[in-house]
């Protein structure tokens, strides 16, 4: 087995979700789930087939997001994995519903941080060992930083 690290290309630091599923129907079901969860969302989804013709299948509502999803899916190249890139929506808006899509078996990351995928290569193919999401912590928040965090969450409407 050989391991490698694939850096996810995300030049504008848009939100993305990286996961694993099990069926060609994934692309259509994720597309339908996003448009019904966040009407008007701009996104791209790409899925790596693991059998048959083994194509990267894609869909979405924004050509830039679709191309970004396709490019990263092909670069990672692990069977039955998918990328979703979101332009004007956040993962928190779709994660609960995404987890109920029957084909989805695992979510590795939901982030706008820099992301690296740790890939294993065997004689059969490629698989995801894990991800590196962002950078390590620089310390522990103090009382002022806790207060700032709580105020920020309330300001943007995620807490009351």
Image: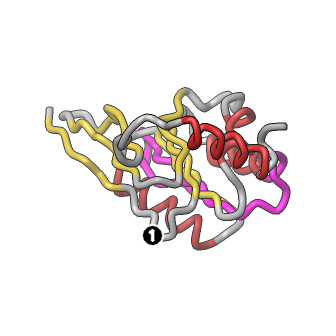
Colour convention of the picture:
secondary structure
- Do we see residue 147 in this rendering? yes
Identify the residue at horizontal 62%, vertical 41% (top origin).
26
**Quarter of the rendering occupied by the C terminus:** top right
Quarter residue 39 falls in: bottom right
Task: Please tell me whether residue 58 belongs to the stretch shown in magenta.
Answer: yes
Quarter residue 133 falls in: top left
Q: Position of residue 158 (x, y in %)?
A: 77, 42
Q: Position of residue 100 (x, y in %)?
A: 71, 28
Quarter residue 121 falls in: top left
For this rendering, which residue is in front, 52 or 157?
A: 157
For this rendering, which residue is in front, 105 or 148?
A: 148
- Magenta-colored span: 35-59
Identify the residue at horizontal 39%, vertical 56% (top origin).
8
Identify the residue at horizontal 63%, vertical 48% (top origin).
27
**The residue positioned farthest toward the bottom in the image shown:** 64
Q: Secondary structure at mark 1?
A: loop
Is 39 on the left-hand or right-hand side of 132? right
Is 53 on the left-hand or right-hand side of 100? left
Is 94 on the left-hand or right-hand side of 12? right
For this rendering, which residue is in front, 29 or 97?
A: 97
Q: Position of residue 21 (x, y in %)?
A: 54, 34
- Do we see residue 20 in this rendering? no
Identify the residue at horizontal 36%, vertical 43% (top origin).
138
Is 23 on the left-hand or right-hand side of 91? left
Give the residue pinned by disc 1. 11
43 up-or-down from 109: above or below: below
**Quarter of the rendering occupied by the N terminus:** top left
Dot 1: within a 10 Å radius of its alpha carbon, few (fewer than 14), some, or many (20 or more) residues? Answer: few
Task: Please tell me whether residue 9 belongs to the stretch shown in magenta.
Answer: no
């Amino acid at each position: 087995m050989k391991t490698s690290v694939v850096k996810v290309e995300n030049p504008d630091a848009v939100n993305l979700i990286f996961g694993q599923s099990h069926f060609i129907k994934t692309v259509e079901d994720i597309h339908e789930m996003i448009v019904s969860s966040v009407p008007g969302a701009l996104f791209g989804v790409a899925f790596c087939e693991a059998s048959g013709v083994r194509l990267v299948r894609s869909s979405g509502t924004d050509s830039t997001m679709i191309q970004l999803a396709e490019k990263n899916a092909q670069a990672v190249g692990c069977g039955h994995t998918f990328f979703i890139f979101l332009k004007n929506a956040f993962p928190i808006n779709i994660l609960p519903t995404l987890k109920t899509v029957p084909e989805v078996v695992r979510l590795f990351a939901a982030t706008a941080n820099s992301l690296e995928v740790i890939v294993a290569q065997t004689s059969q193919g490629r698989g995801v060992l894990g991800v590196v999401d962002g950078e390590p912590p620089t310390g522990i928040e103090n009382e002022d930083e806790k207060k700032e965090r709580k105020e920020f969450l309330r300001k943007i409407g995620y807490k009351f």
